[in-house]
Amino acid sequence: MAKSKSSHRWIQAHEKDSYVQQARDEGFRSRAVYKLQEIDQRDHLLKPGITVVDLGAAPGGWSQYAAKQLGPQGNVFALDILAMDPLPGVEFLQGDFQQETVLTELLDMLGERKVGLVISDMAPNMSGIRAVDQPRSMGLSELALDFARRVLAPGGALLVKVFQGEGIEALTRELRDNFQRVQVRKPKASRSQSRELYLLARGYDV
């Protein structure tokens, strides 16, 4: 019963969320689009004509925004373990990014293209136990970095979601070994009670 009441309160809060309402009004698939939008408007990541890979894409808000910003000359490749309805200008692959066969398929889709930006909003299914969730989250962030190192063009960028806690300092050091600049972003659309942050690494140095 307690869980039901908690779920009901979450639904009520979600419905009153100004970003949820704004996303509906503007035709975006999720409120998460405003996290990417704020970072992009500040850091100018989405340049017309580049190739972008969106990891953890469903339901598609980030891909939707990216495709709009890149224009017809750009390319967006999206991946998620969940299904995602088609989007104009977006090639989608459903699969578990942690599986080598799925990674290989994504690399095949990219072909010879060099990627200008990798964006990752991936998060594990949360158990509520930080000692379990934090390592899982950091594992996904490490996979995103490994992938970025394989596909980014020189000077490219990686935007990756992390959760405050153990492992962030080590990941940040690793990013600084591969990129010229690493910054932390906490967009306004991130819920205040959330531990999520975004690490933005720019100037990939091959």
Image (cartoon, helix red, strand yellow):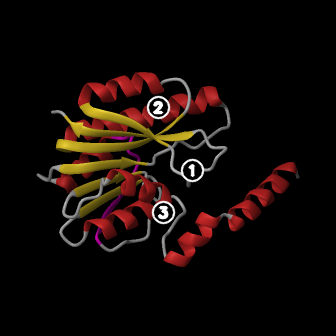
Image coords of residue 165 (percent x, y) = 56, 27
Residue position marked by numbered label 1 in the rendering: 190
**Mark 1 nearby-residue class (10 Å; few <14, some 14–19, many ≥20):** some
Q: Is residue 149 above or below residue 110?
A: above
Instruction: Identify the magenta region.
Output: 89-99
**Does the rendering let one see residue 79?**
no
Q: What residue type is labelled 3?
A: Pro
* The one of 152 and 96 positioned closer to us in this rendering: 152
Which label's residue is closer to the chain start, 3 or 1?
3
Q: Give the mark toward the camera: 3 or 1.
A: 1
* The one of 177 and 151 positioned closer to us in this rendering: 177
Task: Give yes or no for contact between labels 2 and 3 (Cβ–Cβ under 8 Å).
Answer: no
**Does the rendering let one see residue 81?**
yes
Residue position marked by numbered label 2 in the rendering: 138
Residue position marked by numbered label 3 in the rendering: 59
Q: Give the mark toward the camera: 2 or 1.
A: 1
* Residue ID at (47%, 61%): 33
Q: Whole-Å distance between the Cαs marked 3 and 1? A: 17 Å
* Residue ID at (49%, 60%): 34
* Residue ID at (53%, 23%): 166
Tell me the element at label 1.
loop
Q: What residue type is labelled 1?
A: Ser
Q: Whole-Å distance between the Cαs marked 2 and 3? A: 22 Å
Q: Is residue 11 above or below residue 181?
A: below
